[in-house]
Amino acid sequence: MNVRIWLIVLLLAVPGIARAQGYAGLGGSAEGFTVPQPGYAFQFPQDHGPHPDYRIEWWYLTANLKGEDGRDYGIQWTLFRSALKPHEVEGWQSPQIWMGHAAVTTPDKHYFAERLSRGGIGQAGVTAAPFEAWIDEWHMRGSDPNVVSLSANGADFGYDLKLEAKGPFVFHGRNGFSVKSGDGQASYYYSQPFYAVQGVLRLSDGDVAVTGQGWLDREWSSQPLAADQSGWDWFSLSFDNGDKMMAFRLRGDRGDFTAATWIDADGTTTAIPDGSVAFEPLTTALVAGRDIPVRWRVTLPDRDLDVEVSALTPDAWMATRFEYWEGPVQISGSHSGRGYLEMTGY
């Protein structure tokens, strides 16, 4: 059987192994896998690399960009690792499955592509030192994640970018232990939200030189959701005054669970507990046959935050094997700026 066809069959046949975006399936049993616990001591560069004893993991980079043509753009580059069993071996017996997503969003179009690979054969993977994450010819690489080159391509888009961090890594929740439900499900979660970005987008109507800011999320777990949770709304917001905020709402049958991290311009973080930040969908659009919220009100009274978050392009649908919405957003109200929004489970 063709390798790619075999991988597709495997991914669709095994519930939840590649649902890296966090909807139904990641609340299933984590039996046999390591489960995150409070008090984890991060070790670098090791933790920039893979953790095969955990069921799901990702290297997730987004960037808000401005073109030399004056237009706004967004890019996504994501590598997901999902495990059938909690270990790694070389060759075709590897239980690790890799999946890559890449996208470019313009003010009027959304382009995306997807790649799949089995672990253990060199087609995809991550090394911690020197740092490199890759699937096929797509790559994110550098001596460490603070200075990297990034490339990907699809049938009608591509990009080559350079990213340099201008601030520290930040840790979410309790020193990187990010709780996702009232039942205590959690992940290990840190970010590099301070990238300065420059490079070139390759689009059907020509190359565009771009500059902007990027955000890398690193997260791994074995059971990050409760059984009743079916999806989430995740925001990474960069304000013009230099402050930033990561915030999410996990939707469940027993109600929503929320959390956030306020990131001062110097990298100082404050964990925002469940119930403190509020998310109100204001406008929906029909996208891929679904009603998708594309304009939101986000409030955090403790920081005098009351903003509207609006999609640059409402039709930023990732019609991949596990579908979701992902695209750049513009921020107005008490704070102005730009960011990214991810919505799953709709």
Image (cartoon, rainbow, N blue to C red):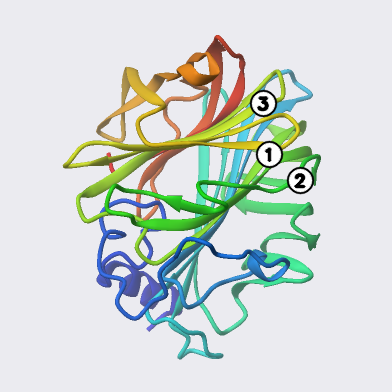
Q: Nearer the viewer, residue 194 or 275?
A: 275
| Separation (CA) of disc 3 from disc 1 | 14 Å
Left or right side of 135 for 211: right
Q: Which residue sits at x=55%, y=12%?
A: 332
Q: Amino acid at mark 1?
A: Gly
Foreground: 214 or 187?
Answer: 187
Horizontal relation, residue 131 to residue 96: left or right: right
Answer with left or right where residue 128 lies relative to residue 164.
Answer: left
Residue of label 2: 161
> Helix or strand or loop: what does disc 1 sit on?
strand
Q: Is residue 234 visible?
A: no
* Labelled pair 2, 1 in contact (Cβ < 8 Å): yes
Pointer 3 residue: 243
- What type is the residue that disc 2 sits on? Leu
Task: Check disc 3 and report its element: helix, strand or loop.
Answer: loop
**Callout 2: helix, strand or loop?**
strand
Nearest the eye: 275 or 340 = 275
The mark lying in front, picked from 3 and 1, is 3
Taking the spot 25% from the left edge, 33% from the top edge, the residue there is 289
State the mark number for residue 214: 1
The x and y percentages for residue 177 are 49, 55
Mark earlier in primary sequence (2, 1): 2
